[in-house]
Image (cartoon, grey):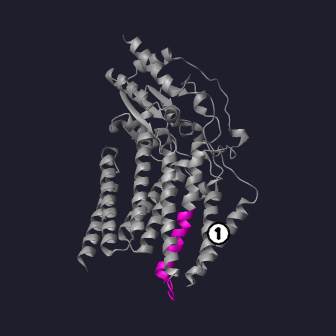
């Protein structure tokens, strides 16, 4: 092995170790930032080693270097601008776009290698290369269009509700036949570019038809699933070009994304297959006889809510997408500090699927410098609700709905935060509108619940001001 090969292999080994350690550090919010930095450093090492190897072997022409440099500058510029300017409410859309870019790039690597090999006279593509090539094209193409459509749904460019057209199942079957049949033909030793093109187009179409019928309630799971597919596509690209760093990085992303997808699905008490079939988010599964339980809604103002919070010994705050939509993370952090200064025991209850992507609430609260020790996951916080004097719900809907404990509703069996078991409940919400599941939240008619109808940012600011006025 030449010196440059040895150095490159060692660099890839360091990069791989950085990925593994970085992923481990991301297990805890307290060390997640260091994990991200370490993983980024590992990727920088891998990229630098690859460029050095290419330069040493003289594999790129001056024009190629110009294209590579321009692409690097463009990508770095877009990435930096996105990181500095994107709003926290748009992070799920950005993650989906990153998934699309990753999947699309991996598919292009496989396509480029296929074109290169088929252009060599009397050359044939061996199965060890053809198999990952086809898998990379299929998975990368599905991820590309599926992630773009998911981003469009989250941004509002495409309706967030499940979109189903007549014959969609037949279309999916036909697309699957083209992908499987074309893939089998290529696996057999053929290197027909037209067949690969047909497989590519079918996979691109399948990405659209797969995500269209999936509703907004399932977006956290969908984003996680597409992230896993992106990682798998990247790993396949690594097999295609023989790059161990890509294989390891892609495998880690694919495996961790798959595990997270399973955990997210379990948190909704639904199978991944059921999520992919779609339909959740419309309330269609609701039994009309089991939906509404009746009861009165009690409304209060900031002053009344402030009295309850100011004299509470234990307060549990439940953030939801309404907090993100109003960008009220700093206001809730200020309220938490104020309550702690008055001697209250304050904690935040985090449901796994609150928001629009895994860890959405954690990211928002971390931006507002809420201490990690105050963030408690569902299983940890649920036993504490009976001791809470006040549970303050901010824009969370389905994840607090007691209807999940009864059969015959759209969310039956879904694990929820036991907010209704607190001594008093205050809900800050802009309106009495439904959540993604499309059903009434039975928490709102509970005798212990009082509704403070306001935008989360405005309502929290009014609460904080009212408490300060109350206590002098």
Horizontal and vertical percent position of residue 27? 35, 51
- Viewer can see residue 58: yes
Nearer to me, 125 or 253: 125
Query: Eyeballing the image, is 375 above or below 53?
Result: above
Q: Residue at x 41, y 29 (%)?
A: 330
- In which quadrant will I find the C terminus? top left
* Magenta span dominant secondary structure: helix
Horizontal and vertical percent position of residue 50? 33, 67
Query: Eyeballing the image, is 415 above or below 254?
Result: above
Res. 281 image quadrant: top right
Asked whether residue 133 is drawn in magenta, I would say: yes
In the image, taking residue 361 as reference, residue 341 lies left or right, namely left
Query: Eyeballing the image, is 29 above or below 212?
Result: above
Q: Residue furthest top?
A: 472
How many circles with numbers are drawn on the protein?
Answer: 1
Nearer to me, 42 or 170: 42
Res. 143 image quadrant: bottom right
Badge 1: few (under 14), some or many (20 or more) residues near its Cα, within 10 Å?
A: some
Q: Residue at x 57, y 62 (%)?
A: 142
Q: Residue furthest front?
A: 62
In the image, taking residue 115 as reference, residue 464 lies left or right, namely left
In the image, taking residue 300 as reference, residue 11 lies left or right, namely left
Asked whether residue 125 is drawn in magenta, I would say: yes
Horizontal and vertical percent position of residue 246? 39, 66
Q: Residue at x 59, y 48 (%)?
A: 152
Nearer to me, 21 or 295: 21
- In which quadrant will I find the N terminus? bottom left
- Residue bounds of the magenta highlight: 120-141
Nearer to me, 369 or 146: 146
- Residue indicated by mark 1: 176
Horizontal and vertical percent position of residue 31? 30, 47
Q: Residue furthest bottom?
A: 122
């Amino acid at each position: 092995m030449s010196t440059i090969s040895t150095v490159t292999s060692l660099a890839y080994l360091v990069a791989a170790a950085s990925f593994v350690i970085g992923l481990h550090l991301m297990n805890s919010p307290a060390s997640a930032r260091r994990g991200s930095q370490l993983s980024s450093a590992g990727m920088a090492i891998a990229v630098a080693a690859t460029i050095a190897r290419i330069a040493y072997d003289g594999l790129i022409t001056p024009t190629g270097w110009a294209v590579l440099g321009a692409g690097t500058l463009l990508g770095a510029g877009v990435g930096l601008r996105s990181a500095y300017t994107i709003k926290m409410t748009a992070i799920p859309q950005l993650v989906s776009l990153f998934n699309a870019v990753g999947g699309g790039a991996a598919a292009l690597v496989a396509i480029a290698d296929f074109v290169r090999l088929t252009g060599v006279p009397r050359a044939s593509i061996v199965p060890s290369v053809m198999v990952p090539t086809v898998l990379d094209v299929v998975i990368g193409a599905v991820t590309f269009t599926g992630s773009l459509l998911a981003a469009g749904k989250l941004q509002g460019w495409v309706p967030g509700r499940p979109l189903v057209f007549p014959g969609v199942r037949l279309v999916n079957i036909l697309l699957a036949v083209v992908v499987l049949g074309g893939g089998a033909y290529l696996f057999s030793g053929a290197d027909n570019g037209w067949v690969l093109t047909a497989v590519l187009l079918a996979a691109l179409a399948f990405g659209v038809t797969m995500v269209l019928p999936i509703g907004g309630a399932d977006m956290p799971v969908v984003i996680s699933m597409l992230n896993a597919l992106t990682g798998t596509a990247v790993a396949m690209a690594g097999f295609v070009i023989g790059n161990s760093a890509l294989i390891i990085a892609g495998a880690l992303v694919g495996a961790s994304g798959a595990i997270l997808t399973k955990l997210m699905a379990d948190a909704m008490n639904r199978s991944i297959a059921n999520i992919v079939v779609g339909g959740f988010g419309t309330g269609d599964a609701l039994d009309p006889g089991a939906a509404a339980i009746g009861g009165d809604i009690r409304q209060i103002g900031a002053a009344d809510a402030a009295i309850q919070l100011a004299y509470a010994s234990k307060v549990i705050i439940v953030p939801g997408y309404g907090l993100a939509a109003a960008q009220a993370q700093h206001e809730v952090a200020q309220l938490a500090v104020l309550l702690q200064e008055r001697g209250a025991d304050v904690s935040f209850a985090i449901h796994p699927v609150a928001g629009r992507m895994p860890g959405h609430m954690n990211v928002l609260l971390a931006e507002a410098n809420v201490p990690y020790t105050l963030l408690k996951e569902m299983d940890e916080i649920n036993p504490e609700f009976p001791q809470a004097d006040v549970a303050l719900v901010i824009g969370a809907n389905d994840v607090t709905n007691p209807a999940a404990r009864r059969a015959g509703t759209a969310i039956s069996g879904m694990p929820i935060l036991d907010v209704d078991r607190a001594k008093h409940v205050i809900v800050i919400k802009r309106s009495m509108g439904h959540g993604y599941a499309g059903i009434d939240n039975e928490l709102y008619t509970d005798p212990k619940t009082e509704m403070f109808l306001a935008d989360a940012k405005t309502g929290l600011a009014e609460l904080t001001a009212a408490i300060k006025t109350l206590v002098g």
